[in-house]
Amino acid sequence: MERRTTGWLSGMVGVVIFSGSLPATRLAVMQFDPVFLTVARALIAGVLALGLLFFFGAKRPVRGDIIPLLVVAAGVVVGFPLLTALALRHVTSAHSVVFIGLLPLATAVFGVVRGGERPKPAFWLFAMTGSALVCAFAVAQGLSASPVGDALMMAAIIVCGLGYAEGARLSRRLGGWQVISWALVVSLPWMVIASLWSMPASFSGIGTPALAGLAYVSLFSMLIGFVFWYRGLALGGIASVGQLQLLQPFLGLTLASTLLHETVTWTMFAVTAAVIACVAAARKFAH
């Protein structure tokens, strides 16, 4: 199979997995503190990643990989999970998931800065159009309703875009699952300490939905999804495959409506449909 097609298919699997992240986080933060949720998911995924690295005898990163791995850890292991968990204390997952439409643009920008990619000018036109539609939706919903929640989501998008681009750059040499695994292992000592510090006094009152949310974001959002996502970005191109995340709001809105019974308005779907239309056009001019 052609390299770029393989990259897009792998990236699509990652997007499908990630689409459940915000609804699962929403379930978890109903009973878990956002800080504990962030460090607990990283701790669980980190222990699993350590086992994978040991079992497969993965090659250790060289000294020059440490700083990039720390950037990945800061962006996708700590930054995005913590900021979104805090944001979901103020906004619904149906509202926050639409901000994911900004991730492809952020990823593409960092792909140019850190990955050395050079998409055609038309690519930026479609990428910015999709992002502008997302911003217009947020304004139409009334940012004054929860400026804190929306500001936290914007910060989450920026740090996540950097983590995606940096991880994709490393994946070209180390491999997708190795990058996220080493990033989790690098952050593991701090996650152990932070988990013990932020752990609730008792888990007896924690319901099944919150536990299920924690399990999903720990296993799928924090580890398995990145195995496919980083491989896709490395094979198909950071800017190009990154546009697949424009599909994530649609998947996330569907989950928010069916699983959480949140209100999904026609404008949410209209904006999502519009940004999805930018995917094919942006892909054409990504290389």
Image (spheres, rainbow, N blue to C red):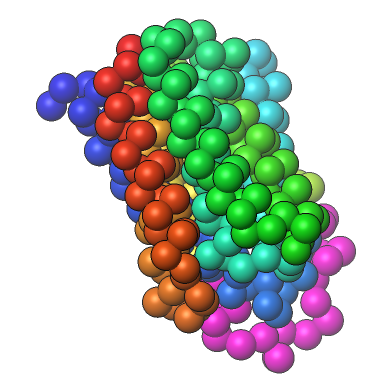
Q: Quadrant of the N terminus?
A: top left
- Residue 213 shown in magenta: yes
In the figure, residue 257 lies in which quadrant?
bottom left
Residue in front for this viewpoint, 177 or 269: 269
- Residue 97 shown in magenta: no
Q: Is residue 147 left or right of residue 124?
A: right
Q: Residue at x 52, y 52 (%)?
A: 98
Q: Quadrant of the C terminus?
A: top left
Number of labels in the image equals: 0
Instruction: Kindly tell me whether residue 187 is visible in this rendering.
Output: no
Residue in front for this viewpoint, 59 or 248: 248
In the figure, residue 2 lies in which quadrant?
top left
- Rendered view: 192 above or below 75: below
- Rendered view: 226 above or below 117: below
Residue in front for this viewpoint, 112 or 280: 280
Which residues are drawn in magenta?
Answer: 191-215
Farthest residue toward the right? 197
Q: Is residue 180 left or right of residue 229?
A: right
Q: Residue at x 56, y 51 (%)?
A: 137
Q: Residue at x 54, y 36 (%)?
A: 132
Farthest residue toward the left? 1
Expressed as whole percent of the image width and height from the top left, the position of residue 123 reads 40, 19
Expressed as whole percent of the image width and height from the top left, the position of residue 286 reads 36, 17
Residue in front for this viewpoint, 119 or 211: 119
Q: Residue at x 78, y 58 (%)?
A: 144
Magenta-highlighted stretch: main secondary structure?
Answer: helix
Instruction: Kindly tell me whether residue 111 is visible in this rendering.
Output: yes
